[in-house]
Image (cartoon, rainbow, N blue to C red):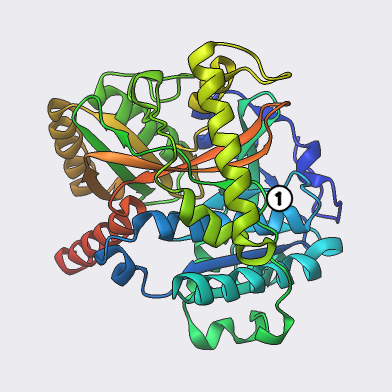
Amino acid sequence: MAVSISSADDFYERLAALSDFGRVGDDTAFSPVPDDWCLLAADIVRSRDALAEGRYKTVNMIAAAVVTAVLNACGRQELPFVFGGDGAMAAVPTTCQGVASRSLAGVRVMARKVCGLELRIAAIPVSALRARGVDLRVAKFELSPGNNLAMFSGGGVEMADAILKDPDGTGPYGIDAGDAGVADLDGLSCRWEELPAEHGSMVTLLLRPAANTPGAVSGILAGLSGALGIDLASRTPDIAPARRSNLRFRFPPTGLWREARIVGHERGRGVVLLRAFWESLAFVLAKVSGMRLGSFSADSYLDDVILNTDYRKFDDTLRLVLDLSAEQVGALRFHLDAEQGAGRLDYGMNVSRSALMTCLVFNLERAGHIHFVDGSDGGFARAALDLKARLESVREDR
């Protein structure tokens, strides 16, 4: 049953979680976000330049920092968000819009000072999105008990992205540079090494129904499952990018200094570096020895990491990161080209040899952690460029 559009700070927390990813194609699974909530949006300006310089992990860390800062500013209340590789969005209630906006502005300051990257940021009222003829509806997909991903429908996320990238359109929703506050990035980390593709290729996909018709998304998922010979909606499909055999942790982690610079911008790099060093050492010892450290079990944590990755999500666009064989990649291209040619979908694709994982770890004892996955060479950003090029080509043909 849909939740009322009237305000409720715990609106998202009260939503029942879906256990079947296939239901992202079911419009009745989504509820309208309250009118007086706000969608905080951010993306990296000229992210293609940063990717061309090989700064893939830094780009992902800045995007993940947006989510981390907003959630921390709101007292780690459960809120709907989406990670897009070179940007992110999160919906927040009125009561924490001010502090969350200031924290987001703090991420912009950090990105500029620490990484030399500029962020576009905006605070767009949900009511303003509806006034433009779109909606913002959300469903909650359970990864594991207590860890959920938001799925969005209604066109609100796409409209927010267009507003964010339009200098004139952003004006009324801009966040003043003088309002920057402290960006609390506690929980953000990047300690896993790249995830190598075990089947041959890590494929980053963006897929959109060409027409907003009932069953269109379900049809896309069913077509993909048929082309790949596997059920994409199953709990742990064999083509998921993270599995026990390719999770790699070295000591000290390759990304330790990057984490210290970004997370320690406010708290102090030395403090963050020392804490991350000892936590990493403790994890290695627990993993090698098989011993529990208090309530922490390295073995259980690895199982949770595999479940808690965001390799499949939906915000009017299906976003997937899949580990595929050469035969599956070929079958996928053939299927998607045929579907696009028939006018049923539009897509963008990027193929790399591995995936990157950036982590949001709030509570290990209670298994409270989510892991953001992207293709290792800027998968989502490059897939978005491919989607744009294909759309332009389709328009010319039509």
Dividing the picture into quadrants, the one containing residue 47 is: bottom left
Residue at mark 1:
32
Q: Does residue 45 appear left or right of residue 103 in this picture?
A: left
**Mark 1 packing: few (<14 Cα in 10 Å), some, or many (20+)?**
many
Dot 1: element: strand
Q: Nearer the viewer, residue 16 or 45?
A: 45
Q: Is residue 333 above or below residue 76?
A: above
Q: Horizontal and vertical percent for residue 141?
A: 61, 33
- For the point 72% across and 48% down, which residue is it? 79
- In the rendered image, the quadrant that contains the N terminus is top right
Res. 36 visible in picture: no
Q: Does residue 297 appear left or right of residue 246 in this picture?
A: right
Res. 180 visible in picture: yes
Q: Horizontal and vertical percent for residue 296?
A: 67, 21
- In the rendered image, the quadrant that contains the C terminus is bottom left
Q: Does residue 169 appear left or right of residue 60 in this picture?
A: right
Q: Is residue 121 above or below residue 6?
A: below
- For the point 70% across and 59% down, which residue is it? 184
Q: Horizontal and vertical percent for residue 338?
A: 17, 41
Q: Report the number of discs.
A: 1
Q: Is residue 302 above or below residue 45?
A: above
Q: Nearer the viewer, residue 328 or 359?
A: 359
Tell which residue pokes out farthest to the top in this image. Answer: 290
Dividing the picture into quadrants, the one containing residue 108 is: bottom right
Q: Nearer the viewer, residue 47 or 166?
A: 47
Q: Is residue 361 above or below residue 173?
A: above
| Amino acid type of the residue that numbered disc 1 sits on in the rendered structure | Pro
- For the point 49% across and 38% down, which residue is it? 310
- For the point 73% across and 26% down, which residue is it? 366
Q: Horizontal and vertical percent for residue 293?
A: 67, 19
